[in-house]
Amino acid sequence: MTIESHRGMKAKTIKAILAKKFKSLVDTIEDEAVRKLVENNTIITGGCIASMLLGEKINDFDLYFTDHATTKAVAEYYVKRFEVKNRHGIPCAVTVDDRDNRVRIVVKSAGIASADGATSEYEYFESSPEDRAAGYVGEVMSDVGEIEEAYQETEQLALQTEGAVYRPVFMSTNAITLSDKVQIVLRFYGAADAIHENYDFVHCTNYWTSKDGNLTLRQPALESLLCKELRYVGSKYPVCSVIRLRKFIRRGWVINAGQILKMMMQVSELDLAEPDVLQDQLTGVDSAYFIELMSKVRENDPEKVNAAYLVEIIDRMF
């Protein structure tokens, strides 16, 4: 289902789906203090809204928080409810590290953790008045049907898992993945504009806020979605952006040479032979392969890590 078929959802439908999805998650939070923080300080943004506007399958719902206190409280809440064992069946210690105003998940002797001990991929992500943007969507897209029907169709796409709903099934340094297609991002928090400073492509910058239930649709994002053209707005993580291109191209998106050049210019300013820089740049694409890559890099003398060495390791692993 694509935008060309005029089967994308209207703003009111998306708003209702996000509100209901969010409520179903909040209702499972047993700690009253944490539940209230989540109710008042959550932002849903990224690919899920873009997918609904296009009438495409939703991979997951990305949740961010507007402040440090909520981010930390949520991390601690789900860490306490997460049991992880390494590949040998030995329990691993999972803790929350809170330094320099950044909340991290720390798994002893590992960078990522899953409930069954296996490694897995973690994927991670204006000018016109917002009411004009919402109207713009309504004019160019027809209704997909009743809100409840649309919500039920969306829920059928959710990951079928055993056990309690919205239970933690996977953790990395930067995020907690829950069952039922919810991903809680810890790496960034703040107002929507602050979070989107770390986003690379403009089409993912629409967002919903839990405090008022408002859906904000941004004109540049809508224009990018209408033509399925990637528009790079700059990112602190250009390496991640380049790697993410594969996913979008497979889905039929296009990108012009100028946008790619902007990524290349930002990448050229980085010292990727520096392990800390390389690891930070792989934020959002920290699959098992990249975790292993960083492990190999850190085993060696830093002075021996250069482009030639990295190329050799990458060729062996991929």
Image: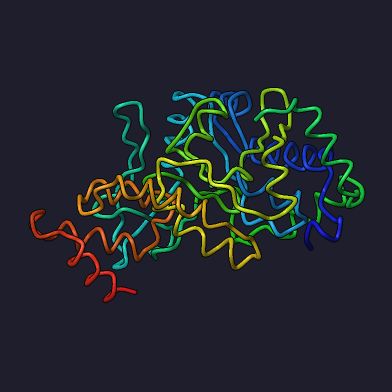
Instruction: Confirm whether residue 80 shows in the render.
Output: no
**Picture mark count:** 0
| Quarter of the image where one finds residue 118 | bottom left
User: Does 171 sit above or below residue 16?
Assistant: below
- Image coordinates for residue 93, horizontal then vertical, percent: 29, 48
User: Does 133 sit above or below residue 315?
Assistant: above
Front one among 193 and 69? 193
Taking the image as shown, residue 197 lies to the left or right of residue 143, namely left
- Image coordinates for residue 80, horizontal then vertical, percent: 42, 40
User: Does 97 sit above or below residue 62?
Assistant: above
User: Does 299 sit above or below residue 21?
Assistant: below
| Quarter of the image where one finds residue 311 | bottom left
Quadrant of the image containing the C terminus: bottom left
Front one among 122 and 254? 254
- Image coordinates for residue 187, horizontal then vertical, percent: 42, 38
Residue at the image position 71 percent from the left and 23 percent from the top: 212
Residue at the image position 86 percent from the left and 55 percent from the top: 6
